[in-house]
Every structure is written in C-alpha cells, then in structure tokens.
Image (tube, grey):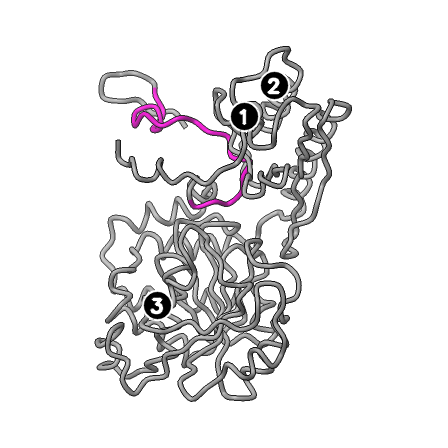
C-alpha cells in the first residue's frame, strides 16, 4: 500500500526504509517475515494498540478462542513457537511451584529436568530446537538414531528425571523411520510422561491433541497469517504451568497486547477463511510454473504434496547440467533479479529447489513464470550459473554492516 511521506512523495514503507521488494516463493519463513497478515488481524492490532488492558484478562479471553479452535482445555499466546516450547518444557518441570519458576534455568534441584526427543527430530529451524529445551534448564535425551527410532529407544530413555517428551512435526525432520505420534504418546503416557508437540507450521489445529498430545504449540504467524506469535494449547494444568513461566524465564519472551489481539483475530478468521478458494489459486500458480518450464533443456518439474500432510503442494524443480545451471546457480539468478525472487532452497545441494505458492500477492505468479523463462532461455548465463553449494556463515557475521 502506498502512503504519502511528509515531503509529499508517494512511497511505500519498504522504499522509505531502503528494503528491496522481494517475491516470496519460499514459504512461511521467519527470515522473510513469515506471512501476509490477514486484514482482520491488522485491524485488531491497530484497535488494541492505544488501549490499556489487564494482560492476564486478555490472555483469559485468548484462552477461550484458542480452546475453541484447537479442542484444548486452555491456551495462551506467546512471542513465538520457540518460546512456547521453552515455556511448555519449563511448565512440565516446575508445575505451579512459583519459587521453582523463579530459580530456572540454573537451579533444577528436585525437579524432573530431562526431555526425550527422537534424534531425527533434533532440527534447526533458524536456531537448534534443543536450545529451546536448554533455555528452560532442561537436558535433551536423544532417542534412537538419525535414521530410525524403535519403541525401546524411547522406553529405555525414560527415567525418574524425565519431565516430558518433545515431538517435532516439520519438513526439517527425518521423514521416515521415526515413531509416529501415537506410538510416542503411548510409550510416554505409560510412564506418566506428558508429550509436547512442536507443530509450528501446521494447518491442523485439532488433530495433534486428538491423537494423544498433551500440549501442542503452533505458530501464529505462518499459515494462520497473524502477527509474530506462538500459540500454546492443551491440558489445562500443563498450560497453566507453562503460562506461569511469564514470571521467570519467559519474561524475556513476553508478547504484546497487539500481538495477542491480532492472533485471536487471525484464529477467528481461520474459521471463516475460503480454504478451497486459496487452494485453487495456489494450484493455478503451480500449473503455470510447471507449464512454463515444460521442454526447457535440463529442467524438470513436478508438483509434490507437503511432507507433513498440510493441504498444499509445491513445485519441485530439478536442475541438470544441460541447463547450464546448477540448482544453486538458478536460485541465485532468481534472487539477483529485480524484484528478487526467493525460492525454497534448503535442498539445493541435491540438485533441486521448490517454489511455494502460499505467500503470493496478485500478479506475482506471472512475474515468477516470466523470470524463469527469461533466465533459462537467455543466450548468456550469469557468472555464478554453475555455483556449487557450500556452507558460509560470513554474511551473518557482517551484520549490521
């Protein structure tokens, strides 16, 4: 949306801040701003911004909305899914012991402080997930191997100091050989161990509790299209204990009144959203891109389902040497254009990347199609067309320069 600055020029906020106007075909990525916030959430945030409010009462109202949408007994809003994990783990350790809450994370004397996680679930989503556990003062106990977890791996990992089991649902995890949520819950519950599910980027707001989880944590700013936030839902005693961590380690993770109101509005909007219509538009973009790439030398494309069974598809683009690009090189060429097109590139070393249609503005699917054809049919290739993937953290170390 254009706004007029004080000097009368017609500019966007990105132009005023010197930020480049990217096209996001990577997905609901935090590094790109997560999602396009729905108008209902923006309106609620704006309305709440100038109001005084008793935060516990606002969170009580949020609990009602969260419980209705998820089937949990109670719920609350926090800063993000990562903070929700820390709070849920800490709550499983301390219960409602206020002194124990104040003593975390260093003093865990007398508390259960071990958390079982399948090794194939110990992922990095921008930070290592085990750090969210360690922030609570707990210790991760890995179960199984990176390629397989058997029932006895989890069963024998449970000890007197086990506070919880953490189950991760994400495309980052190993997608084979792990115990199902039902199996994981059955083993943990037989020993009185609660199961906490990290479902940050999942559509299904009710299924994980229905399948046996005790606490589930969702992102409020991914598919829900709310402000940056996390949603904690589930068993009332565990949710209460997690919420009380606002008196301790979660003080550094506090969420503003605007984000609570915005997330509540996004949840309400989710009930009324035209999911079928959105799916239709996404499928149209995928077929446009696939047709655009048809017959181009060294390029193949297929539409594939989401790996965690969310109701969406992506286009997987395979890049062979005949194209005179590597997957990394083609992704770089797209990102170097104007506007930059940012693809889902977490598997480029395997010779492919993905296009995700869930965060497109009107007209952007056509821009992506045109850019793909222009780059791949040009006589000349950019200097880094055959770029090889290598890990390089130097860019991160240069910030804020």
Vertical order, 323 against 82 (above or below): above
Q: Measuring 26% from the left and 35% from the top, which residue is drawn there?
A: 400
Give the SS element for disc 3: helix
Mark 2 and mark 3: Cα distance apart in space? 46 Å
Q: Tell me the magenta residue range.
A: 11-30
* Apparent side of residue 316 relative to residue 37 in the rendered image (left or right): right
Looking at the picture, tell me which residue is in the foreground, 130 or 267: 130
Give the SS element for disc 1: helix
Looking at the picture, tell me which residue is in the foreground, 398 or 12: 398
Q: Residues within 10 Å of mark 2 (few under 14, many from 20)?
A: some
Give coordinates of residue 231: x percent, y percent: 43, 62
**Contact, CB < 8 Å: mark 2 with mark 1?**
yes
Q: Residues within 10 Å of mark 1 (few under 14, many from 20)?
A: some
Mark 2 and mark 1: Cα distance apart in space? 8 Å
Mark 1 and mark 3: Cα distance apart in space? 38 Å
Q: Residues within 10 Å of mark 3 (few under 14, many from 20)?
A: some
Q: Quadrant of the N terminus?
A: top left
Marking on residue 375: 2
Looking at the picture, tell me which residue is in the foreground, 15 or 65: 15
Residue assigned mark 3: 134
Give coordinates of residue 105: x percent, y percent: 27, 72
Q: Measuring 24% from the left and 48% from the top, which residue is drawn there?
A: 50
Give coordinates of residue 143: x percent, y percent: 53, 73
Q: Measuring 56% from the left and 88% from the top, which residue is drawn there?
A: 190
Please tell me which of labels 2 and 3 falls first in the chain. 3
* Apparent side of residue 108 relative to residue 149 in the rendered image (left or right): left
Give coordinates of residue 135: x percent, y percent: 32, 66
Marking on residue 334: 1
Q: Is residue 28 magenta?
A: yes
């Amino acid at each position: 949306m254009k706004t007029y600055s004080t000097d009368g020029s017609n500019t966007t906020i990105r132009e005023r801040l010197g930020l480049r106007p990217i096209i996001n075909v990577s997905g609901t990525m935090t590094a790109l701003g997560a999602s396009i916030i729905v108008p209902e959430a923006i309106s609620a945030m704006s309305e709440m911004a100038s109001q005084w409010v008793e935060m516990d009462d606002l969170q009580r109202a949020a609990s009602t909305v969260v419980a209705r949408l998820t089937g949990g007994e109670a719920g609350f809003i926090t800063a993000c899914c990562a903070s929700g994990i820390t709070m849920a783990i800490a709550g499983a350790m301390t219960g409602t012991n206020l002194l124990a809450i104040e003593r975390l994370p260093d003093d865990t004397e007398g508390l259960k402080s071990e958390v079982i996680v399948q090794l194939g679930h110990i992922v990095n989503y921008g930070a290592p997930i085990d750090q969210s556990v360690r922030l609570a003062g707990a210790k991760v106990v890995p179960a199984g191997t990176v390629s397989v977890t058997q029932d006895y791996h989890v069963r024998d990992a449970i000890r007197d100091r086990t506070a919880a089991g953490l189950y991760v649902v994400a495309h980052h995890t190993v997608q084979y050989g792990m115990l199902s949520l039902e199996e994981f819950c059955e083993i943990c519950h037989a020993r009185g161990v609660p199961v906490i599910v990290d479902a940050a980027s999942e559509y299904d707001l009710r299924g994980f509790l229905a399948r046996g989880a005790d606490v589930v944590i969702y992102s409020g700013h991914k598919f829900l299209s709310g402000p940056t936030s996390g949603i904690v839902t589930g068993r009332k005693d565990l949710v209460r204990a997690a919420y009380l961590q606002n008196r301790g380690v979660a003080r550094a993770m506090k969420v503003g009144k605007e984000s609570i109101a915005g997330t509540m509005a996004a949840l309400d909007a989710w009930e009324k959203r035209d999911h079928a219509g959105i799916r239709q538009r996404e499928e149209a973009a995928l077929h446009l891109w696939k047709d655009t790439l048809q017959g181009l030398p060294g390029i193949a494309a297929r539409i594939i389902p989401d790996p965690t069974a969310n109701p969406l598809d992506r286009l997987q683009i395979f890049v062979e040497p005949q194209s005179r690009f590597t997957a990394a090189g083609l992704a770089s060429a797209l990102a170097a254009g104007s506007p930059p097109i940012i693809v889902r590139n977490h598997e480029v070393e395997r010779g492919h990347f993905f296009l995700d249609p869930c965060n497109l503005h009107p007209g952007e699917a056509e821009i992506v199609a045109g850019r793909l054809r222009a780059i791949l049919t040009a006589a000349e290739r950019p200097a880094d067309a055959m770029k090889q993937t290598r890990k390089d953290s130097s860019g991160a170390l240069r910030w804020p320069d």
